[in-house]
Amino acid sequence: MGKNSGVKPGEQVASNRALHNDMQLVEDTNGEYDAVVFHVDRYTLIRGEYYPIGKNFHYPKIWGRKYAATKLIEDIMADKRRSIEEAESELIKLQKCLDKVNLWSDTDQ
C-alpha cells in the first residue's frame, strides 16, 4: 500500500486561490476619471473569466493594476460603443417611421 498523503476526504488539494484587488473608476470634480485600486488582501477563488460590473472590477492581484485598468476601461468603452450603435439604429428606424407619418394627409382622422 502507498503512503497516506495526509489529504482528508473533501479537503482542498489544488492551489486555486489567489489575492485579489478591487478597482473602480472614480470621477473627480473636473469630470475626469481615475482608476483607483482597493487592496482586499484576502485570498479568494480564481475564476475562469473576469468581467467588470459597471465601473467596478474584481481581479487577481498578480495581473497588476495597469492590465486591470486597461481591461476595465476597454470593457466600459466597448459597452458605450454598443449603446451608441443601438441608439443610432433606433434613430434610423424612428426617422423612417416619421417620414411615413409625414406622408399622411393632415385631414385624415
Image (cartoon, rainbow, N blue to C red):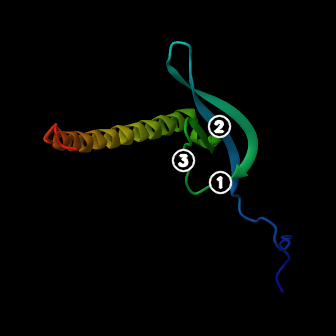
Callout 2 secondary element: strand
Where does the N terminus fall, quadrant-wise? bottom right
Among the two numbered marks 1 and 2 on one chain, the one whose residue lies closer to the N terminus: 2
What amino acid type should be assigned to the residue bearing mark 3? Tyr
Q: Residue 108, which numbered label?
A: none
Callout 3 secondary element: loop
Depth check: give the residue in front, 22 or 84.
Answer: 84
What amino acid type should be assigned to the residue bearing mark 1? Ile
Q: Which residue is mark 2?
A: 22
What crowding class fits label 1: few (fewer than 14 Cα within 10 Å), some (14-19), or many (20 or more)? some
Residue drawn at the location 51% of the way across and 37% of the way down? 72
Q: Nearer the viewer, mark 1 or mark 2?
A: 2
Q: Position of residue 9 (x, y in %)?
A: 83, 74
Q: Residue 51, which numbered label?
A: 3
Q: Which residue is mark 1?
A: 46
What amino acid type should be assigned to the residue bearing mark 2? Asp
Is residue 80 shown left or right of residue 6? left
